[in-house]
Amino acid sequence: MSEHQHGDDCGCGHDHEQEEHVFIVTDDEGQEREMVMVYTFESENNVYAVLLDRNDPEADGVIFRIEEENDESFLVGIEDDAEWDRVTAIYEEIARKESEDK
């Protein structure tokens, strides 16, 4: 797999003017992937982040809850089905509205 080189005219849809927030995320098979935070939103007093695979920007995004402890932020997987259903519905609505605006 070749690494995606981001530039002003790469056509990936990312805003390259902003600093990328890159995280190393280990998937269920133990594979480490570089993930880029592309969007954040709030729901029920929690903040959520949408991350895309840096090397496969066309793949589905992953949603994590952001938790803070001692002035540090952590990405936490969403285990609760009701919470997952709620935040995915919110993000799908946000994505639908953004695609309509283009």
Image: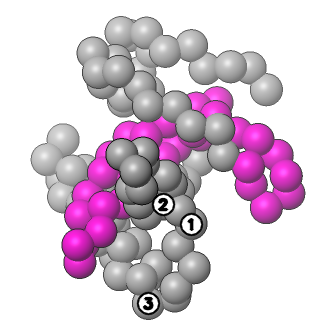
* C-alpha span from label 2 to label 3: 14 Å
In the picture, measured across the screen, residue 27 lies left or right of residue 20, that is: right
**Vertical order, 31 against 93 (above or below):** above
Q: Tell me which numbered mark, 2 or 1, is placed earlier along the sequence.
A: 2
The C terminus appears in which quarter of the rendering?
top left
Q: Tell me which numbered mark, 1 or 3, is placed earlier along the sequence.
A: 1
Q: Residue at point 76% right, 41% down?
A: 32
Which residue is nearer to you in this view: 52 or 30? Answer: 30
> Magenta region: which residues?
26-55
* C-alpha span from label 2 to label 1: 5 Å
**Vertical order, 50 against 63 (above or below):** above
Q: Residue at point 58% right, 32% down?
A: 54
In the current view of this chain or complex, which residue is farthest to the left? Answer: 101
Give yes or no for residue 35 being in the magenta stretch. yes
The residue identified by callout 2 is: 64
The residue identified by callout 1 is: 77
In the current view of this chain or complex, which residue is farthest to the top? Answer: 8
Q: Residue at point 36% right, 9% down?
A: 8
The N terminus appears in which quarter of the rendering?
top right
**Vertical order, 15 against 68 (above or below):** above
The residue identified by callout 3 is: 82
**Vertical order, 12 against 5 (above or below):** below
State if disc 1 and disc 2 touch (CB < 8 Å).
yes
Please state which amino acid type lies under the numbered disc 1.
Gly
Please state which amino acid type lies under the numbered disc 2.
Phe
In the picture, measured across the screen, residue 66 lies left or right of residue 94, that is: right
